[in-house]
Image (tube, rainbow, N blue to C red):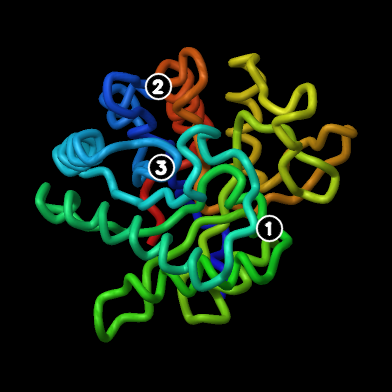
Amino acid sequence: MITPPAAAIDLNADLGEGFGRWTLTDDEALLSVVTSANVACGFHAGDPSIMRRVCELAAERGVRIGAQVSYRDLAGFGRRSMDVPAGELAAEVAYQIGALEVFARAAGSTVSYVKPHGALYNRTVHDAGQAAAVIAGVRLAADPGTGGLPVLGLPGSLLLAAAADAGLTAVPEAFADRAYTAAGTLVPRTEPGAVLHDPDAVVARAVRMASEGVVTASDGSAVAVAARSLCLHGDTPGAADLARRVRAALGAAGVAVGAFA
C-alpha cells in the first residue's frame, strides 16, 4: 500500500549533481539538514568520485542514501524525456542502483530507496510502461530474497501504483519549491512560475504540506498532497539556507522531521 501521511516528515534533497570539476549542489551543507539524500548515479549527473564522497558524508551524518536514477542524459541533465525500451530502461535503473550501492557499502551504509530524476520522474507519473520498467529495474537490483527498495514518487502516480502492485513500499513526496497543477502534478519547468524563488513562500508551503497535506495550485485551488517525504531542491541558489529555514519552520509548527519508515 502507499504509505499514508505520518506524524513526522522526511526531508530529501538531490545531491552529488556535479561531474568532474563541475559542481552544482552544496552537498556538505545540505547533508546537515536533510534526512534522506537522493544521490545522482552518473546518468544525469555525478561521477564515481562524487558518488563516493557524498555516500561518505551521508554515512558520517546518519543520512539515508537513496539512488536517484535517470535517463542516460548527461547533456540534458536528465530533463529530456526519452523513449527507452522497457528492458533497456530496467537494466539501466538496476545498473545505477548497483553502482551507488558499492560506494554506500564502502562508507558503511547502504542504498535505502530509489527516486527517479527529472524527465523520468515526470514520465512515470502517467506512462505505465516506463513506470513498470523502473520498478522492474528496482527489483532486478534487489538482494536475493528481498522484493526491492522503497520508491519515492508523486502521489497518485503510476510509478507508485506499480511499486505497490510489486509489493514495494511506495512513498509519496511533495515539492516545496515547485508549482502544482490543479490535478496535483508538477507544472513543467518550461512554463513560467514552475519553480518558486520566494523563500518565505517556499517555507510557508512546506509547513502547510507537512501539517495539513494541502498545497495551493497555480490556479488558486487547494490540492491534497498526502506526502511522507518533502523534497528540497539542492540546485537552486541559496538552497542550503532555505533548507535550514524549512526545517526550523517545521519544528516551530510542531512537525517532527525524520526518515520515513
Q: Amino acid at mark 3?
A: Val
Q: Amino acid at mark 2?
A: Leu
Q: Which residue is mark 1?
A: 125
- Left or right: 172 in relation to 157: left
Q: What is the spatial separation of the Cα atoms under label 2 and label 1, in whole angstroms?
A: 26 Å
Q: What is the spatial separation of the Cα atoms under label 1 and label 3, in whole angstroms?
A: 26 Å
Q: Nearer the viewer, residue 177 or 251?
A: 177
What residue appears at the point 40 percent right and 20 percent down from the top-left corner?
A: 240
- Left or right: 186 in relation to 46: right
- Left or right: 199 in relation to 140: right
Q: Earlier in the sequence, mark 2 or mark 1?
A: 2
Q: Nearer the viewer, mark 1 or mark 3?
A: 1
Q: Which residue is mark 2?
A: 24
| Residue 195 occupies quadrant | top right
Q: Which residue is mark 3?
A: 257
Residue 148, image x, y percentages: 37, 74
Q: How many numbered callouts?
A: 3
Q: Amino acid at mark 1?
A: Val
SS of the residue under disc 3: strand
